[in-house]
Image (cartoon, grey):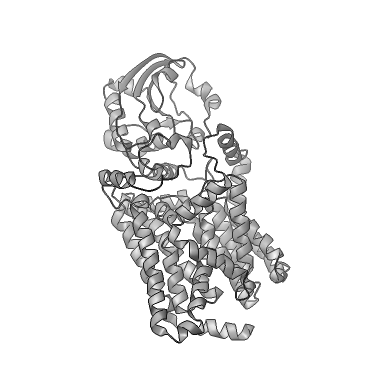
Amino acid sequence: MHEASETRIAGKPRFSLLVPTIIAAGYFLTHTATAARYGYFRDALYYLACSEHLAWGYVDQPPLIVFIAWIARHTLGVSLPALLLWPALAGAARIILTAAFARELGANKFGTALAAALAATPAVWYVSDHQFAMNAFEPLFWTGCAFAVARMIRTNNPKWWMAFGAIAGLGLENKYSIVAFAFSLLVGLLLMPQRRILFSPWILAGGFMALLLFLPNLLWNIQHHWPFLELMRNIRASGRDVVLSPAAFLAQQILILTPATLPFWLGGLWFYFSSAGKRFSVFGWTFIFTLGGFLLAHGKNYYSAPVYPLVLAAGAVAAEKFLSKKHFEERPHMRTAMEVAMFGWLAVGILLLLPVVLPVLPIDAYLCYQAHLPFVVPKSEHNQDAAILPQHYADEFGWEEMVSRVAGVYHSLSPEEQSRTAIFANNYGEASAVDFFGSRYGLPKAICTHQNYFLWGPRNYTGEIVIRMGIKPEDARDSYESVRVAATLDNPYAMPFEKNPILLCRGRKKNLQTDWPDIKNWD
């Protein structure tokens, strides 16, 4: 049976990935067409700022996304269409990889096409693939690891541990959460008859490969006393994250995956524990352990998104097997109608939600659309409660306007005063906006104690004259002899906490050079 399965999969026509490629191309073009609709996302500006300070690690992320930002800066450029080309490519690759994973599970031509359609349907990925950030690349590493294990199971070739290690090592340089996935996958293997592939010298070689790729960032974290762990502790202690009940977490999983995909990924989970898919049941357990881990840890609703290609691909296989039953084989027109209905169901499912997750509408039209939604767009942090837009849109508004107001204050000073004036931002979004847009307005780089900006220090500023961003006047008066509101911000679409006035402060009571270690802001 094993050899027959091998022959069947190996003998599939080469064009079986044609439809997935077409779907991926359509997905890619949809993203490139909407790339410049609103503005730069907060995190994208931050990663571009970090790309001017290349290192093997950063306070709040591993270095891969910054390295990609550095490549972007020195190749295609940092215009919105050029920058968002990278996550759009990652999204297209995810679609093709999901289809390829479905092939490993036994999908034929229709199954691989349906897997691609399922990978192009979840709403959460439209958000992440519209942002230059780590989340767009994360599913590639998780699904890539699963693909390597599926190949091992199917071919009984433990050398695939080398591929697993290489993918996991690069994944660690993208986002540390791959540890949770890899742990769930390995525990799942221990529960399966295929556990024998764990007891091979090749797993040690794969582990060494992963360690070798992760080692530069590991050494950076050791050298800097594990800043990421300190950051995570601070976030937990601050209580800023919205903590979901198990029922709310699962309900939001259905929403962010697009409700239309629910029958398929539930069917995929069933497939892994059925007689048809028990050979690959490790992936069913991996899904359960990963989702359950994030649920118990009160993770944000999108943390589990990268594990869904496993059950979406399996759902496509299950659907294909359902349509291969004798009832449909004897009625080919009914089978064709069912296939068309499945694709139509998925298309309608995402089209109804598309304005929520991709800027296909002008902002005023979107607000009208949002007002008629039968649900409230989920919020992951309490500071988003008063925003009129979802955070993934609100964080694309107001940045250049903010910098222009800062520039007005800065250029109102004499040249001699300007040389002594620090532009002090309250968070990395404000600071990186000044760093990105400031050259257009003749501004120096910003300073900030938030996240990695803290490590870059106050440069030569003492705090004698400071243009303060992101705090209220009453919060600044304890630190300065003089505080004056020099400009106001009023963009209605920006995050509420980014509408504090621009302050001109003089006479900092504690010198920035000596006070800097005490005002670190890692949260």
Nearer the observer, 512 or 493? 493
Is 195 situated above or below 459?
below
Nearest the camera: 115 or 41? Answer: 115
**Position of residue 221 in the picture relative to residue 484 (left or right):** right
Residue found at x 70% / y 67%: 198
Name of the residue lying farthest toward the top = 481
Q: Position of residue 420 (x, y in %)?
A: 37, 22
Residue 239: x %, y % from top left: 55, 34
Q: Give the left or right position of residue 115, taking residue 495 as reference.
A: right
Q: Looking at the image, can residue 75 be seen?
A: no
Q: With respect to residue 436, does 258 lie above or below?
A: below
Residue 421: quarter of image:
top left
Q: Residue at x 49, y 73 (%)?
A: 319
258 is higher (above) or lower (below) than 407: below
Residue 44 or residue 195, whichever sits in front = 195
| Percent position of residue 78, x then y | 34, 49
Q: Position of residue 416 (x, y in %)?
A: 31, 20
What is the quadrant of residue 476 in the picture?
top left
The image shows a total of numbered marks equal to 0
* Quadrant assignment for the N terminus: bottom right
Q: Is residue 156 visible?
A: yes
Q: Is 128 placed above or below 523 here?
A: below
Q: Is residue 173 left or right of residue 358?
A: right
Depth check: give the residue in front, 149 or 192. 192
